[in-house]
Image (spheres, rainbow, N blue to C red):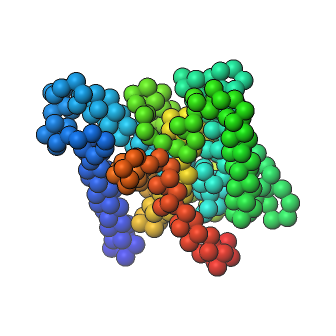
């Protein structure tokens, strides 16, 4: 038996062990979300409330706040993690991230615009966010691919940061001009899970599921794109349609996530890189693992946000604090490797 034949089953086994271990960690963090947060409840009270036992106050906090908030963090984390992996695969850009490339900012700006123009409410935010995310991703890629060198990683990042800043500034200006819109949407300015409940979860999970299925269907094509467009075409990959499908997947995932909790940055950057360091660049493993690691990162960040200060922090602040050093490290590494 050849060495390669012996190595392949070992690699599959080790990756399976990693996946199972991460699932166990995610379950532990989800359980932690039941017991950590505002309100002085014992472990027994929180556990009993899970099964409908306890006074109305305990039941209200545990079943109407902590449980949907924790589940929503997991769903949004999965959406952002997978979106980041797909975006990096489509653009072959190791610095691609829905937040950095302006997709989340586009979704948020569209939500603000909808609120100003037609009085859109939380029930309508999803569709506005989807349109804004798609428009922003197309704009960033179109502008960033102009000129010498095409859509290089550095140009796309600079273009994305510029457009994200412009859209965020416009959104802030609109909320200042329209106080009613500010009162309606200010909680989503940074990205927060505070006050999010079953309504947001019910309007998000199906879109994230559909987007995740679409991402899983693209895994083989993303592996081919890593070889370059010409080689992928020679292998029979419909490159243009794969990119269109990929951007639709990213739009659905980012739009749903932003509509639910606001723009959250760096999750889509950190998660794919962490997964790639463990299992390598094969998207057939990366995408499923991102579906687990994304929730781990966001649920963990939410638990930190709940206990870091006396008043809860927006989870977007925690992910920015964790992700900024990662971006600096990656930018320096990619510059040194002449990407």
Q: Which residue lies most toward the right here?
A: 147
Quadrant containing the C terminus is bottom right
Tell me what residue is drawn at x 71 percent, y 51 percent.
165
Q: Is residue 92 above or below residue 47?
A: below
Please provide percent x and percent y for residue 3. 37, 76
Please provide percent x and percent y for residue 62. 27, 34
Residue 23 visible in rendering: no
Tell me what residue is drawn at x 59 percent, y 69 percent.
328
Of the pair 25 and 55, the residue shown nearer to us:
55
Of the pair 238 and 60, the residue shown nearer to us:
60
Horizontal arrangement in the rendering, residue 290 relative to residue 106 (left or right): left
Quadrant containing the N terminus is bottom left
Tell me what residue is drawn at x 84 percent, y 56 percent.
146
Horizontal arrangement in the rendering, residue 322 relative to residue 57 (left or right): right
Residue 194 visible in rendering: yes
Q: Which residue lies most toward the top here?
A: 118
Q: Which residue lies most toward the bottom here?
A: 336
Quarter of the view holding residue 335: bottom right
Please provide percent x and percent y for residue 110. 68, 34
Please provide percent x and percent y for residue 234. 69, 56
Horizontal arrangement in the rendering, residue 290 relative to residue 86 (left or right): left
């Amino acid at each position: 038996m050849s060495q390669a034949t012996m190595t392949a089953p070992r690699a599959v086994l080790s990756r399976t062990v990693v996946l199972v271990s991460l699932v166990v960690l995610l379950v532990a963090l989800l359980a932690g979300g039941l017991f950590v947060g505002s309100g002085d409840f014992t472990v027994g009270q929180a556990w009993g409330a899970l099964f409908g036992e306890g006074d109305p106050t305990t039941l209200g906090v545990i079943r109407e706040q902590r449980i949907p908030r924790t589940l929503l963090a997991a769903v949004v984390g999965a959406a952002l993690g997978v979106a980041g992996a797909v975006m990096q695969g489509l653009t072959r850009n190791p610095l691609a991230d829905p937040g950095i490339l302006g997709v989340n900012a586009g979704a948020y700006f569209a939500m603000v615009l909808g609120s100003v123009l037609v009085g859109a409410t939380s029930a309508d935010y999803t569709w506005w966010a989807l349109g804004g995310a798609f428009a922003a991703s197309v704009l960033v890629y179109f502008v960033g691919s102009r000129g010498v060198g095409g859509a290089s990683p550095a140009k796309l990042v600079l273009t994305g940061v510029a457009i994200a800043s412009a859209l965020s500034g416009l959104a802030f200006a609109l909320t200042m001009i329209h106080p009613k819109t500010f009162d309606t949407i200010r909680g989503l300015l940074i990205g927060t899970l505070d006050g999010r409940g079953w309504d947001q979860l019910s309007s998000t999970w199906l879109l994230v599921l559909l987007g995740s299925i679409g991402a899983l269907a693209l895994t083989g094509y993303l592996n081919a794109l890593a070889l370059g467009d010409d080689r992928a075409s020679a292998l029979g990959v419909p490159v243009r349609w794969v990119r269109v499908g990929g951007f639709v997947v990213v739009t659905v995932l980012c739009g749903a996530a932003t509509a639910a909790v606001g723009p959250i940055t760096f999750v889509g950057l950190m998660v794919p890189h962490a997964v790639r360091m463990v299992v390598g660049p094969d998207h057939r493993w990366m995408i499923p693992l991102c579906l687990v690691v994304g929730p781990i990162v966001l649920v963990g960040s939410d638990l930190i946000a709940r206990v870091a200060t006396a008043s809860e922090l927006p989870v977007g602040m925690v992910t920015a604090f964790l992700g900024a050093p990662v971006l600096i490290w990656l930018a320096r590494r990619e510059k040194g490797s002449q990407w």
